[in-house]
Image (cartoon, grey):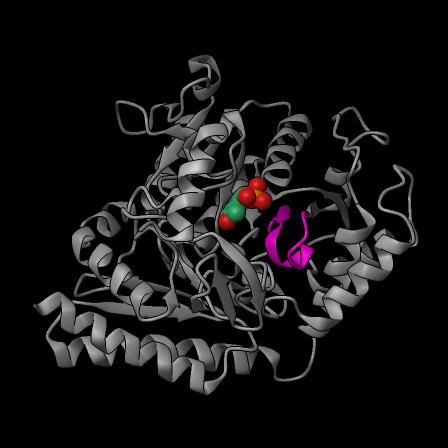
Amino acid sequence: MNTKNEDLFARAQKTIPGGVNSPVRAFRSVGGTPRFFTRGEGAYVWDADGKRYIDYVGSWGPLILGHADPDTVAAVQQAAANGLSFGAPTEGEIELAELLVARVPSMDMVRLVSSGTEATMSAIRLARGFTGRDAFIKFEGCYHGHGDSLLVKAGSGLLTFGNPSSGGVPADLAQHTMVLSYNDPQQLRDAFAKHGEKIAAVIVEPVAGNMNLIVPTQEFLDTMRELCTQHGAVLIFDEVMTGFRVGPNSAQSLFGITPDLSTFGKIVGGGMPLGAFGGRREIMEQIAPLGPVYQAGTLSGNPLSVAAGLVTLKKIAAPGFYDALGTKTKAFVDGLASEAKKAGVPFSAQSVGGMFGLYFAEQCPGNFAEMMRGDLKAFNTFFHAMLDGGVYLAPAAYEAGFVSIVHSDADISASVAAGAAAFARLKD
Ligand SMILES: *Cc1c(COP(=O)(O)O)cnc(C)c1O
């Protein structure tokens, strides 16, 4: 007999490409049937067959307060009762903008959009409009949403411009994007020496979380800041994932870097669709209606999303919030690492604030190529063993994981115990 998850997946595939509305949900990389969720509460989600999981995906980052946080739900319900959308300004948008610029000192002004993709796409356009240049630099393994200019892989030679990494992206467009290796300051210096006057922007995940978790070196980020300043390029920190995830003022304050533009999403919408981009006043004043760079959105600043974002940003400002979150996250990864060691499985793990990386390799990787050397088969076996044990991890080896503030010590211990059983299965 099929499970309900299997029936739903079969049905979904008839009308939805691959049965999912975002590719990683399809379990292609780990194999098996995606779990269809019916409910989430606190640290837990329940699938269509009624099985409960301790969740370490948190909707890919937004749910720092856990599922169905009562204050967030109440605020969204109240906002909904007052009208779903106006396409006209509301006071809540000002309040959210004020909170964001207060928490992120590099931002003088901010604009709200509906997703992280929109935020990064708009930031790139703005950087190009501001500098009058077309080229920009991104790093291999960093994900910045699915905008055309950002779906680019490295070109054929070092320091050459890139090729599309997706069908449907014009090669002409990819030619403006240069893809460099993460954590390689010398490559950045060489790229600026060669093409400095053409480069509009450098965009980076200040802690990378879309190729598993990769921690930047201080030198890498410092070099990027210096070179952008020297050459008149715009430094864009894509904090869609790291924003309010790694600390109360996001990654830029952890590393003491002031980017020119920053992008946000995920946590700032509290689980509702919302993104934001902001930065230096003279740059932000280039956006319509003040300036010539066009950007707009029918549902931008949606009152329900703003309500959820406001509650979230207020609750995470509670004293001790990030200490508690960081302690829980570290307890989880340290617990797993210790069980792996006991089981004799090559494994390493690390965390920054409320995000973590698990690697089936002796050492934590420093860039995309190193990360790709991890044991994919071991991860996939581990993933399914955890799933059986009631722990939901991201269904792909190359993803960071997330802990919420409502994951209890008991949840963490139960998850580590599931991990011990999963490592044992790997040795079978
Ligand atoms: C998730 C993510 C995006 C894209 O955001 P969406 O809301 O999925 O469009 C962009 N950049 C980073 C760093 C992300 O993690």
Work out which residue is located at the far left of the displayed protein and give it. Answer: 428
Judge whether residue 376 can be spotted in this image: yes
Q: Is residue 268 magenta?
A: yes
The answer to whether residue 348 is magenta is no
Residue nearest the observer in this picture, 393 or 248: 393
Q: Is 380 on the left-hand or right-hand side of 241?
A: left
Choose top left, top right, bottom left or bottom right for residue 306.
Answer: bottom right
Residue 72 relative to residue 67: left or right: right
Q: Position of residue 305 (x, y in %)?
A: 75, 52
Q: x, y percentage for residue 245?
A: 55, 64
Report the span colored magenta.
Answer: 259-273
- Report if residue 34 is visible in the image: no
- Quarter of the image with the C terminus is bottom left
Residue drawn 40% across the image and 70% down it: 351
Residue 127: quarter of image = top right
Residue 74 in the image, given as x and y percentages of width and height: 79, 67
253, 224: nearer the viewer: 253
Q: Which residue is located at x 53 percent, y 71 percent? A: 404
- Is residue 293 depicted above or below 336 in this figure? above
